[in-house]
Amino acid sequence: MSGRTFALPPRHPLPPGVSLPQDSAQAYQDSETGAFLFWSQAESRLVIPPFPIDRFKETSGWHIGPMHSLLDRPRRIAVVLVRLGGFAIGVFEGERLIASKVDSPFVKGRHRAGGSSSGRFARRREGQARSLFDKACETFRDVVEPHRTSLDHLVLGGDRMTLVDFEKRCGYLSSFRAIRLRRILHVPDPRQKVLENAIQVAYMSQVITFTPARPSPA
């Protein structure tokens, strides 16, 4: 297919003569990893990769080589999955799990009744959640610290609001800010198999297909 391929690092300006529909433009603007743009007037594709593009490149025609090079590059990735149903911590060499720990501390579900009993229940539940976060943080340190200097990325997954509370509780996590990717992996309650499959989710790209607007006649 005729056209051009652009490797666009995060926040790189679009090439001259190239415009994106609103949803595609927003996806590129929000991307922390940049995008590959396969451009032609008949049909175009914007691919948001899972890992950052480090330099701009333009080639004639549609070429997937640069995208494959990015995805095939050897990486060591720490994955932290946390939900109130448990947590799973792993370190992956490519897609191979090389270190892990999974646990399922008990946290009570939501209480439906009102009154003083609901207050006691809420406090107990909050205490159980804090205990889970502390244990997950300690496990994160134990599993990841031996690999710390060789890590390329850190990815979190699970329930978004639970992760917010976990981050507030686990100060050690902030020391990985430089290599953390912002995307959240959406996974069920963390178990060993869920952790093993999470790396496949971490490697997924977002693909948006669109037809570019035709230039207005002079």
Image (spheres, grey):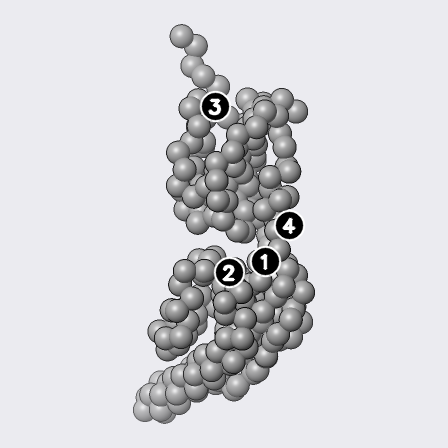
Label 4 residue SS: helix
Residue placed most toward the observer, 198 or 99: 99
Give the percent coordinates (x, y) of residue 215. Answer: 45, 17
Q: Nearer the viewer, mark 1 or mark 3?
A: 1
Measured Cα–Cα span from mark 2 to mark 4: 15 Å
Task: Work out whether residue 155 can be spotted.
Answer: no
Instruction: List the residue tagged with mark 3.
Output: 213
- Label 1 and label 3: CA atoms lie apart by 38 Å
Q: Can you tell which mark lies on residue 72? A: 4
Q: Which mark is residue 200?
A: none
Give the CA separation, mark 1 to mark 2.
8 Å
Question: What element does badge 3 sit on?
Answer: loop
Quarter-wise, where is residue 194 in the image? bottom right
Of label 1 and label 3, which has the lower sequence position?
1
Mark 2 and mark 1 in contact (Cβ < 8 Å)?
yes
Amino acid residing under circle 4: Asp
Label of residue 75 in the image: 1
Q: Which residue is at 45% across, 32% downward?
A: 21
- For badge 2, the amino acid type reads His
**What residue is shown with label 2?**
153
Q: Residue at 49% across / 63% down in the picture? A: 154
Q: Would you identify the image quadrant in which residue 3 lies?
A: top right
Nearer-N-terminus badge (2/3): 2
Element on which disc 2 rests? strand
| Neighbour tally class for label 3: few under 14, some 14-19, many 20 plus, Cα within 10 Å | few
